[in-house]
Image: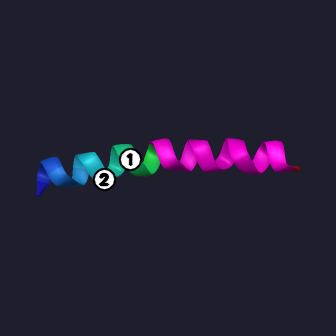
Amino acid sequence: MSTRELSVGEVARRSGVAVSALHFYER
């Protein structure tokens, strides 16, 4: 579970950053 949570956290962080950048550019 620990390894899985870490993977999900990393992906969520990268996705969050990408989504944030996309939204920022969209503005």
* Residue under label 1: 11
Q: Quadrant of the N terminus?
A: bottom left
Q: Residue furthest left?
A: 1
Q: Secondary structure at mark 1?
A: helix
* Residue under label 2: 8
| Dot 2 amino acid type | Val
Point out residue 21 in the picture as x, y percentages from the top left corner. 69, 41
How crowded pointer 2 is (Cα within 10 Å; few <14, some 14-19, many 20+) is rated as few
- Tell me the magenta residue range: 14-26
Real-space Cα separation, disc 2 to disc 1, in angstroms: 5 Å
What residue is rendered at 43% in x and 51% in y? 12
Asked if the magenta segment contains residue 16, the reply would be: yes
| Dot 1 amino acid type | Val
| Mark 2 and mark 1 residues within 8 Å of each other at the beta carbon | yes
Magenta span: predominant SS is helix
What residue is rendered at 14% in x and 47% in y? 3
Point out residue 6 in the picture as x, y percentages from the top left corner. 24, 46
Q: Residue furthest right?
A: 27
Asked whether, in this view, residue 7 is left or right of residue 15, the answer is left
Point out residue 4 in the picture as x, y percentages from the top left corner. 18, 53
What residue is rendered at 26% in x and 47% in y? 7
